[in-house]
Image (cartoon, grey):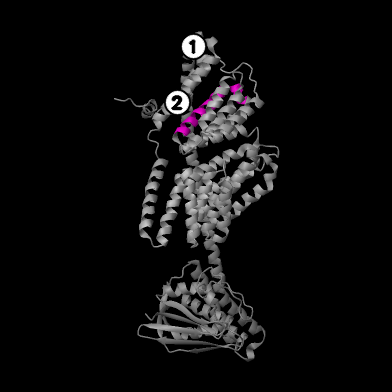
């Protein structure tokens, strides 16, 4: 029976694979000597620059394996290479194999990350090359993030940021950008956009003499990533804004980097393609077509980002299709198919099939449409399956780990032949050190778990505080609303008292007796006190229903407001039959007072306000009609809202608070009735109240 891979057995015992790798690497380190690198750590920048340039050229014109073989061979003849020389080699190879669509490449990349950490096995080396050591943490975090081990990834990003912060604050931005990338992968696009904006601000702190990556690549990339987040959130105007910012940044800074024009053009082409996709979502085909064409022109050239050109071709085909330019859509699909025949791209092919079946469906050719739909679904299944297919990862990992460890052993043997006699003793020492490291790791993990638990408690407390603050805010808003209601409803009785007092003082005794004014003051004062008492219990539900004679009730309401109408030379025409109703007198008085006050307020001087009633078998309908300015059509749906924007000034400049009709409707509905109106602008308004008699 075939035995299981070592890494699989380790997983069954809950011991992390990476722990074993550290033990093996420590063993290799101690196997050969106390110092696996030259006694004098001297780096050779010019020589390494030349080697890396040659490797880059081979990677471009041939393939990654050819570039790797060249570097391995060159460094085999370069035993005096310093730590930074070796670091640069591993970093460059890491970039060659950082292909997330290739499982083999990813495992090889992990081996080079291990090699980077092996370089910094001593404290003195870590301090001397602190920036490079921090970057190694960034590489490890990237790998952990792709494996969706987000806790470990964040841990490495955090440690790396701590290492780089005292040295160069401007280089914090790659670590913030990685957190943004993690958030993006979790589809939290709004939060990711915020992190990318923060990374951009950090990158802008870098001095003018910094690297091309910090001065150009990262900055335009962060702006473009913010736009992509907004595109996925369907905040399309924001996406267009940030794509424009990225293009403006490129235009303003490209002249500073004359040797990087190829990369700059590719970046511009990618942004054009993404921008065209946003315009397509907006159905702005006039702007989408030229930017997509420019994206294709740029990145379809040799030694450019041809995959992106294929994506733009697929998008342009869809634009032509949606814009009913069928001939151009057909032509663009044929060009894309020709490109795919020479450069395979499953994602672009999937998009092509999607456009094809919709194209033929639009031409009413169901046979061809169904054929491409089947191809689309079949390829989509394969693409989805490949994106999750890591079933054989353990076997590949074991094989490549053995190959890489063998390579390291051979190189160590070449450099340390003089120390073979001390192998056994040093090996035992290395195993002891590895065991102590393992114990230390266990203690560290326990501490991290305690910190995580404490963090959860803090988050819980913060959540409770936030909830309490929300409740207090709602309470504050409710209190403010209640104050507005009190102020609004007290205006009528207090206004009547004030008006009666003014008329008494102005000598109106010749027209009416003092008892009339005193009776009005007494009635209004009682109404105000009842209203205050009612509002202190703060509800609009009827709680003191009693039998009320409607004609007498309406007459008392009219008497209170008659003086206000007379100040505008208005008359109130009340005609009603004697009808007994069962209502809460105080609350219904608030309704009638609100409606009459509004009629007076919005009617011109000299007009008449009409009040009529009509009784059916078990219900009574009350009509209050004015000859005022009416209610415009655009405000009719808003007048009953408690926070209505439908606030207009009266015909004599009276202020409006926008609460009366909302309160009135609540009271009428609490009486099992209904309140509505009919109105035409500048022709008056009629309000109707209907409620049960009993």
Q: Quadrant of the N terminus?
A: top left
Q: Residue at x 35, y 57 (%)?
A: 367
Judge whether residue 202 can be spotted in this image.
Answer: no
User: Which tag, 2 or 1, sits closer to the chain's start?
Assistant: 2
Q: Is residue 394 left or right of residue 492?
A: left
> Observer-nearest residue: 393 or 322?
322
**Mark identifier at residue 569:** none
Q: Residue furthest top?
A: 421
- The image position of residue 681, as x and y in percent, is 55, 82
What secondary structure do most residues of the magenta stretch adopt? helix
Q: Is residue 386 above or below residue 245?
A: above
Q: Which residues are the magenta region?
A: 104-127
Residue at image position (65%, 51%) is 248
Question: Which label sits on residue 423?
Answer: 1
| Position of residue 365 measured from the top left corner of the image (x, y, whole percent) | 38, 60
Q: Nearer the viewer, residue 476 or 25?
A: 25
Circle 1: element type: helix
């Amino acid at each position: 029976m075939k035995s299981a891979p070592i890494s699989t057995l380790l997983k069954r015992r809950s011991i992390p694979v990476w722990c074993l790798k550290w033990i093996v690497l420590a063993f290799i380190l101690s196997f050969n000597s106390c110092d696996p690198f030259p006694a004098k750590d001297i780096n050779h920048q010019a020589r390494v620059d030349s080697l890396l340039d040659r490797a880059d050229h081979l990677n471009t014109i041939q393939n990654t394996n050819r570039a790797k073989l060249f570097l391995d061979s060159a460094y085999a003849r370069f035993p005096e290479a310093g730590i930074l020389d070796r670091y640069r080699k591993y970093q460059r190879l890491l970039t060659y194999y950082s292909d997330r669509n290739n499982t083999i490449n990813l495992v090889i990349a992990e081996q080079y990350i291990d090699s980077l950490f092996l370089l910094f096995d001593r404290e003195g080396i870590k301090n001397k090359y602190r920036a490079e050591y921090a970057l190694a943490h960034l590489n490890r975090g990237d790998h952990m993030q792709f494996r969706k081990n987000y806790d470990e990834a964040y841990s490495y990003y955090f440690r790396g940021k701590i290492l780089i912060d005292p040295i160069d604050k401007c280089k914090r931005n790659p670590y913030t950008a990685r957190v943004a990338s993690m958030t993006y992968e979790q589809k939290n696009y709004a939060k990711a956009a915020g992190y990318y904006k923060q990374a951009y601000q950090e990158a802008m702190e870098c001095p003018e003499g910094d690297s091309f990556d910090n001065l150009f690549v990262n900055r335009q990339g962060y702006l473009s990533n913010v736009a992509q987040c907004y595109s996925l959130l369907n905040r399309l105007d924001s996406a267009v804004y940030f794509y424009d910012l990225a293009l403006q940044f490129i235009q303003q800074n490209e002249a500073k980097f004359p040797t990087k024009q190829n990369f700059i053009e590719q970046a511009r082409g990618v942004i054009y393609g993404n921008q065209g996709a946003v315009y397509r979502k907006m159905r702005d085909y006039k702007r989408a077509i030229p930017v997509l064409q420019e994206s294709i022109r740029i990145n379809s050239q040799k030694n450019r980002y041809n995959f992106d050109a294929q994506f733009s071709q697929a998008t342009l085909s869809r634009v032509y299709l949606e814009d009913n330019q069928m001939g151009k859509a057909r032509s663009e699909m044929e060009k894309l198919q020709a490109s795919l025949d020479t450069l395979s791209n499953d994602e672009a092919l999937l998009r092509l099939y999607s456009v094809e079946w919709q194209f033929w469906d639009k031409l009413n050719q169901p046979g061809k449409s169904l054929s491409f739909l089947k191809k689309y679904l079949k390829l989509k299944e394969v693409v989805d399956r490949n994106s999750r297919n890591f079933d054989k990862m353990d076997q590949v990992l074991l094989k490549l780990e053995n190959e890489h460890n063998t390579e390291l052993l051979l190189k160590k043997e070449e450099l340390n032949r003089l120390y073979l006699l001390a192998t056994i003793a040093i090996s035992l020492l290395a195993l002891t050190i590895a065991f102590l490291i393992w114990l230390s790791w266990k203690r560290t993990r326990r501490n991290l778990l305690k910190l995580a638990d404490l963090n959860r408690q803090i988050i819980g407390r913060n959540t409770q505080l936030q909830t309490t603050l929300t409740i207090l805010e709602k309470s504050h808003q409710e209190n403010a609303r209640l104050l507005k209601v009190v102020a609004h409803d007290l205006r009528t009785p207090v206004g009547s008292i004030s008006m009666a007092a003014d008329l008494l003082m102005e000598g109106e005794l010749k027209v009416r007796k003092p008892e009339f004014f005193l009776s009005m003051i007494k009635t209004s004062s009682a109404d105000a006190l009842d209203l205050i008492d009612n509002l202190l219990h703060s509800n609009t539900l009827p709680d003191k229903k009693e039998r009320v004679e409607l004609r007498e009730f309406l007459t008392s309401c009219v008497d209170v407001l008659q003086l206000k109408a007379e100040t505008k030379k208005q008359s109130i025409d009340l005609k009603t039959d004697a009808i007994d109703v069962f209502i809460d007198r105080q609350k219904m008085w608030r309704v009638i007072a609100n409606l009459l006050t509004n009629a007076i307020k919005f009617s011109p001087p000299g007009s008449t306000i009409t009040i009529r009633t009509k009784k059916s078998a078990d219900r009574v309908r009350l009509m209050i009609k004015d000859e005022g300015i009416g209610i415009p059509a655009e405000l009719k749906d808003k007048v009953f809202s408690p926070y209505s924007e439908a606030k207009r000034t009266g015909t004599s400049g009276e202020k409006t608070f926008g609460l009366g009709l909302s309160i009135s409707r609540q009271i009428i509905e609490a009486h099992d009735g209904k309140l509505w109106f009919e109105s035409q602008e500048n022709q008056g308004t009629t309000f109707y109240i209907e409620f049960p008699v009993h």
